[in-house]
Amino acid sequence: GSKTLLQSTVQALQQKEAALQHRLAEAGDLNEKLRVLQHQLQGSQQQENSIAASYKEALEAIDNAQRENRHLQKEIEDHKQTILALQQSEFENWKRLKETYEQTEECKVDLSSGLVREGQKDIQLANLREQMRQLLAIQTE
């Protein structure tokens, strides 16, 4: 009786052991699958990290480009102001030059009419002298 009990206990233990072995094998498979998944996850995390790094770099590049753009726009604005100031001063110079030229022309006109007047006075004077000479000539005759 006790032999049969022992046999059935051994048998039951052997079955349990077989079941345990089977579960261990399954656990090993699961472990392997888990390891592969972890590896993939690490890979995708590294990918995610490198994507995040690339994104950060791109943002920095955009920031730099925008900063440079603002700087260039300011330079362009400064150049425009300088050009406007130069154009304005050139315009003022031309205006002054034109005014000076007009004044010179007016002076020429005044001078020439003055010369004409002087000339007329000279002629009148010469006429008077001639008349006086004639008068004197008549008187001395």
Image (spheres, rainbow, N blue to C red):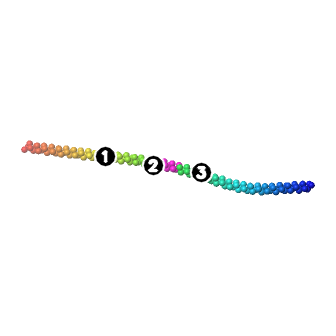
- Magenta stretch holds residue 75: yes
| Residue at image mark 1 | 102
Which of the two marks, 3 or 1, is nearer to us in this view? 3
Q: Please, which residue is most extreme toward the left here? A: 141
The residue closer to the viewer here, 63 or 106, is 63
* CA distance separating discs 3 and 1: 68 Å
Q: Residue at x 85, y 55 (%)?
A: 12
* Residue 69 image position (x, y, % from top left): 51, 50
Point out which mark residue 56 bears: 3
**Viewer-side residue, 115 vs 4:** 4
Q: What segment carries the magenta color? A: 67-76
Name the disc covering residue 79, or none: 2
Q: Secondary structure at mark 1?
A: helix
Q: Crowding near pointer 3: few (<14 within 10 Å), some, many (20+)?
A: few
Q: Specify the label residue 121 is tagged with.
A: none
Q: Earlier in the sequence, mark 3 or mark 1?
A: 3
**First in sequence: mark 2 vs mark 3:** 3
Q: Is residue 93 magenta?
A: no
Circles 2 and 3: CB atoms closer than 8 Å: no
